[in-house]
Image (cartoon, rainbow, N blue to C red):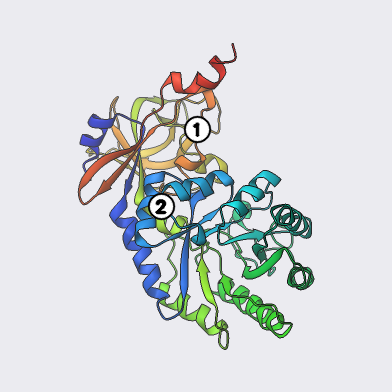
């Protein structure tokens, strides 16, 4: 990838995505599950750019959405309503109503209160709501506490006994149609065992529900497949699929998957330009034009992203922090990395930013959001224009 040419053409900071990589990842995952009925619902929260979604839609993907805005993005990008799941622990009445009107595949319910609210709204619309219930299997995924979701201490889902009660209630409701069951134990998981433990627990629950004449059709195993940021080893997809299959013996269910990071994470690069270098008595800083508002993961999670310097060779590489212009001590993209001497205009590439990069960016310090670029079949194209200052103030200026 010619980062110098891309920087010259589109300026920096800049997000760049390899669309061929995204398509290959989707095909590899789909192939692993080909022995059973399956639907891969891309988790839009990872990267909600319309062109990214459209690329996956053309491959046959559905969408896992956590807001009505994401549902609308999925529809605009060409995803069939019957391939869309609406998840999330805090859906508003208006979001639920609009989702039901759009006739998506199902609403993923996360509490008894939400179940009753979905029922009331479905009654107002005089139409049964297709639902799944997110069940918390209380499995420790051994991941970062901020992205762990499968323990009792997390806010997501309901426990087994509550789930049974809710399914029986839904079965007997005129306005609820319980067609699915769902679990998601966390993100960036790199060991197979937690997935299989959770799947086994939920599969047993399904067998109990079927015995009670609850007609479950969809078995949603969530997402969470980890990727390589530094030295992680990714889970073998064949072993992952075969392991899930082994927990579903005797059950004729369509398997739903909700990958986000797995599909897009390592497709992405963040290109940023050096403004200055600075040293004090104990630290070397490389100050760049990209910042925590553009890429939050290092500041939020202390996440590791590989950093490389473009076209700079030096035998005098030393420890440095890569920091941005934001007025916060937490504004860094990398800490304590051995990097060569840079100069004004040198380009740095931050790797593995295709997931939770641009989608978590903000306008903090009144910084316009950066441009996004796709590379496909060797051709680059812009998929989101760089914001201007006028874009930033438009909704406020109208109120002056």
Do the CB atoms of the residues marked 1 and 2 lie less than 8 Å apart? no
As drawn, the label of residue 202 is none
Give the x, y percent position of residue 294.
Answer: 46, 35
Residue position marked by numbered label 2 in the rendering: 78
**Residue pictured at 49% horizontal, 63% vertical:** 225
Relative to residue 279, is residue 249 depicted above or below? below
Give the x, y percent position of residue 300.
Answer: 56, 42
Give the x, y percent position of residue 46.
Answer: 48, 50
Secondary structure beneath dot 1 equals loop
Query: Which circle's residue, 1 or 2, is located before the other in the chain?
Result: 2
Q: Is residue 12 left or right of residue 135?
A: left
Seen from the viewer's position, the closer of residues 3 and 354 is 354
Secondary structure beneath dot 2 equals loop
Is residue 47 something that shows in the picture? no
| Marks 1 and 2, how far apart at CA | 30 Å
Residue position marked by numbered label 1 in the rendering: 293
- Which quadrant of the structure image shows residue 21? bottom left
């Amino acid at each position: 990838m010619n980062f110098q040419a891309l920087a010259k053409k589109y300026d920096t900071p800049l997000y760049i995505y390899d669309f061929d990589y995204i398509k290959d990842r989707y095909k590899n995952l789909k192939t692993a599950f080909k022995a059973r009925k399956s639907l891969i619902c891309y988790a839009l929260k990872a990267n909600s750019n319309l062109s990214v979604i459209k690329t996956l839609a053309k491959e046959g993907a559905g969408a896992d959405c956590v807001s009505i805005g994401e549902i609308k993005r999925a529809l605009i990008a060409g995803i069939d309503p019957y391939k869309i799941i609406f998840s999330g622990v805090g859906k508003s009445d208006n979001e639920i109503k609009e989702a039901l009107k759009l006739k998506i595949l199902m609403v993923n319910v996360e509490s008894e209160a939400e179940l009753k609210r979905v029922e009331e709204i479905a009654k107002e619309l005089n139409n049964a709501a297709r639902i799944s219930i997110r069940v918390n299997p209380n499995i420790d995924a051994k991941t970062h506490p901020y992205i762990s979701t499968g323990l009792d201490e997390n806010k997501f889902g309901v426990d087994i006994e509550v789930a049974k009660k809710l399914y029986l209630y839904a079965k007997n409701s005129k306005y609820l149609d319980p067609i699915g069951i769902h679990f998601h134990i966390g993100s960036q998981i790199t060991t197979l065992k937690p997935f299989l433990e959770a799947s086994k627990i939920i599969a047993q629950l399904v067998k109990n529900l079927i015995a009670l004449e609850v007609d479950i059709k969809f078995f949603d195993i969530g997402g969470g497949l980890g990727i390589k940021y530094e030295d992680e080893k990714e889970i073998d997809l064949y072993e992952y699929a075969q392991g899930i299959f082994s927990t579903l013996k005797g059950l004729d269910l369509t398997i739903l998957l909700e990958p986000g990071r797995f599909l897009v994470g390592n497709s992405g690069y963040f290109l940023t330009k050096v403004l200055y270098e600075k040293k004090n008595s104990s630290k070397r800083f490389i100050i760049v034009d990209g910042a925590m508002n553009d890429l939050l993961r290092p500041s939020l999670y202390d996440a590791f992203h590989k950093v490389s310097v473009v076209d700079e060779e030096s035998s005098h590489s030393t420890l440095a922090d890569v920091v941005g212009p934001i007025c916060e001590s937490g504004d860094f993209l990398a800490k304590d990395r051995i990097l060569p001497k840079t100069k004004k205009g040198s380009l740095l590439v931050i790797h593995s930013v295709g997931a939770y990069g641009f989608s978590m960016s903000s306008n903090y310090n009144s910084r316009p959001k950066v441009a996004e670029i796709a590379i496909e079949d060797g051709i680059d194209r812009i998929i989101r224009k760089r914001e201007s200052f006028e874009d930033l103030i438009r909704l406020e200026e109208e109120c002056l």
